[in-house]
Amino acid sequence: MMDSFEFSKISAAVLLALLVIVGARVVISSSHPHYDPAAGYQLPEPPPEEAAAGAGAAAAEGPAFNPADVVALLKTAKPEAGKQALGKCTSCHTVAKDAASKAGPNLWNVVNRKLGALGDFKGYSDQMKAKGGEWTYEHLAGFIHSPKKYLPGTKMGFAGVAKPQELADIIAYLRTLADSPAPLPN
Ligand code: HEC
């Protein structure tokens, strides 16, 4: 038979153990905001800039990048998301119809426009003027992904958009900037 003194010692020990466990959990979850007791540790994804810097330039360029993958995403891409992402571009580019160009050429009706051909924009590089061809979806994907790789010597001072989905969203939005948008690829 347990006497009552023995019993209260045991309950006190159990209580103390519980307190320690609960306390430890509180400490763990407050000092490790990503600790979820149910799911265990999940490392936060580093922002893309950091990932690219950490991976080094060669890896960031990604030998795996293929403009055709971006074109394939266009059908399901979200122009609204692309409009948001275009905030990266609008310090240099206007997009409204008939808006004057700024540091970069106006992007209204850019899909299938000739490269470097906007009349009111005087800042094209010689390389852009000499390249020839039209801004097909594929060319836009290649250029916006990596302006300097696509067109060495370009005056577009912009690092590029790494993610295929974001590129597709941006191009899907650019496509809407026209009186009669070009057809989507099959
Ligand atoms: C720092 C300014 C700057 C930023 C930011 C910038 N651009 Fe440009 N962009 C330029 C300049 C300058 C040119 C002309 C490049 C040349 O002639 O070599 C250009 C050219 C272009 C062209 C070719 C247009 C034509 O008439 O041939 C496209 C398309 C384009 N930019 C899209 C974008 C998109 C999309 C973004 C954002 C994801 C972006 N740019 C961000 C400055 C910028």
Image (cartoon, helix red, strand yellow):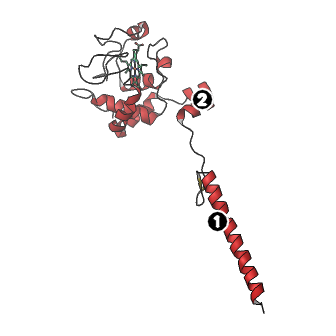
Residue 170 horizontal/vertical position (percent): 37, 31
Residue 110 horizontal/vertical position (percent): 31, 22
- Nearer-the-camera pick, 92 or 20: 20
Picture quarter with ligand 1: top left
Residue 141 picture quarter: top left
Q: Which residue is mark 1?
A: 22
Residue 38 horizontal/vertical position (percent): 58, 61
Residue 137 picture quarter: top left
Could you tell me if the residues under marks 1 and 2 are in contact, i.e. CB atoms within 8 Å? no
Q: Residue at x 64, y 65 (%)?
A: 22
Instruction: Select label 1 or label 2 by which is in front.
Output: 1
- Nearer-the-camera pick, 183 or 18: 18
Real-space Cα separation, disc 1 to disc 2, in angstroms: 40 Å
Give the vertical position of 35 relative to 8 (above or below).
above
| Label annotation for residue 53 | 2
Q: Residue furthest left?
A: 179
Give the vertical position of 167 relative to 136 (above or below).
below
Beta carbon at label 2 within 8 Å of ligand 1: no
Badge 2: residue crowd in 10 Å (few <14, some 14–19, many ≥20): few
Q: Secondary structure at mark 1?
A: helix
Count the marks: 2
Amino acid identity at mark 2: Ala
Give left or right: position of 46 versus 21.
left
- Nearer-the-camera pick, 20 or 144: 20
Quarter in which the C terminus is drawn: top left
